[in-house]
Image (tube, rainbow, N blue to C red):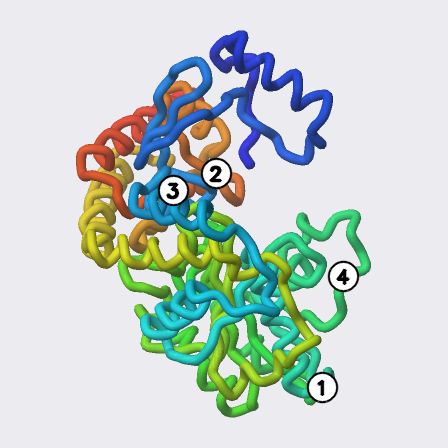
Amino acid sequence: MATIDTASAPLVGAQTQAVMDVFERYVIPNYKRFPVCLVRGLGSRVWDIEGNEYLDLFPGWGCNLLGHCPEPVVRAVQEQVAALVHVPNTWYTQAQGLWAKALADRSFGGQAFFCNSGTEANEAAIKLVRLRSDGKRYKIITFKGGFHGRTMGSVSATAQPKYHEGLGPMVAGFQYAPYGDLAAVEALIDEHTGGILVEPILGEGGIVPPPAGFLQGLRRIADERDLLLVFDEVQCGCGRTGKWFGYQHFGVTPDVMTLAKSLCAGIAGGALLTTVELAKHLRPGMHASTFGGNPIAATAGLAAIEMIEDQHLLDNVDKAAAIFRARMDELKTRCDAVHDVRVIGMMIGIELSIDGTAVVQACLERNLLVNCTQGRVIRLLPAMTISAAEVHEGCDKLSAAILEVAGRSI
């Protein structure tokens, strides 16, 4: 998370300070938090405890793809909570089966394993790669700039040294290649290599699309060397790019796909999808998730899919993305601090030549919520329900913030 310059921040209200005092005493400070206490959200708007309103272009760290408190999902969850909250996976529930079918029907078929988060979905994928060969082919190739989660297996898969500091030794078996470099991938493969794990579109790495032919090349290599091709779509999946899944833009189908974040429209949920044949390796006793696929998450996941289709939100992604692209490209023509603009549906990266954290602060002062990743990339993951007027409002405020910080940097 971007740090905040508290010296230049607005004065913290008494109610916010009271909440912060409780956190300081009782909550482990493993996050750098903004001095804002959010209490309510609707669509692309949130309100803090002092009554201030914000436009949120990074809702829920990418989890709230349908905006805050989407009414069809809220209604479905409220009804489910009153009927059945949780039962173990030793019993059948109707919603989980229907959810798995809905995901299979919109992707490459197969079967689903449900969990609670992206890192858990990737842990399941790591296990699946190893179980396929009874551990003999335990090595997995991942890519620099990628991000796969915070648990020990998924953080070991994340080829960014900053996330490894103080945690060594990492889980064995991960080898890192430059993103986009097929020759480097082939050079790493040996008799112990079992799979390739990649984000089709880098998210935390700065909203970076794959170079032309890269994913197709990975598919070819995986087929030739009998490797599993695993796509981490935790950030780019579930409709964010204007198609149901990111891989559908590139004509390349993975063997395994991991999902989370927006999967349940803000409710915690993750999933691994794979073919029927490969799914057999996740046999009983080898992997599980106590809360995975619980009735609340399953109901929310189904309601999210239905809402996307009923409200034609994939089409709205394309329309909103076109406005973001036009507005940010125009800013680039008149602001040398804007180095590059990358827009893939509701994944937007504005790469700057100035400090991105200062831009985040300047946006906050304008009641606009955004994110900075990789130090200089402003990352937006807007709701696919966002209106054209809200896109323009956000672009107005973001442009002003970038121009202000760029002017101070001259």
Residue 177 location, quadrant? bottom right
Task: Pick out the residue farthest to the right.
Answer: 169
Residue located beneath label 3 in the image: 380
- Label located before the other in sequence (4 or 1): 1
Q: Amino acid at mark 1?
A: Asp
Who's the residue at 45% across and 86% down the image? Answer: 220
Assign a secondary structure to mark 2: strand
* Residue 56 image offset from top left, x and y in percent: 36, 33
Please state, as top left, top right, bottom left or bottom right, where the C terminus lies in the image: top left
Give the x, y percent position of residue 63. Answer: 44, 47
Q: Which residue is mark 4?
A: 170
Q: Look at the numbered disc 3 and give the secondary structure of its residue.
A: strand
Instruction: Measure the alpha-carbon separation of dots 4 and 2.
Output: 27 Å
Q: Number of callouts in the render?
A: 4
Residue under circle 2? 372
Comparing marks 2 and 1, which lies closer to the viewer? 1
Image: 21 above or below 28? above
In the structure shown, which secondary structural element does the residue marked by tag 1 occupy?
loop
Mark sitting on residue 264: none
Q: Who comes first in sequence, dot 2 or dot 1?
A: 1
Up the image or down, 360 lies above or below 377; here it is: above
Q: Amino acid at mark 4?
A: Met
Name the residue carrying label 1. 134
Please state which amino acid type lies under the numbered disc 2. Answer: Cys
- Around disc 2, counting alpha carbons within 10 Å, would you say few (fewer than 14), some (14 to 19), or many (20 or more)? many
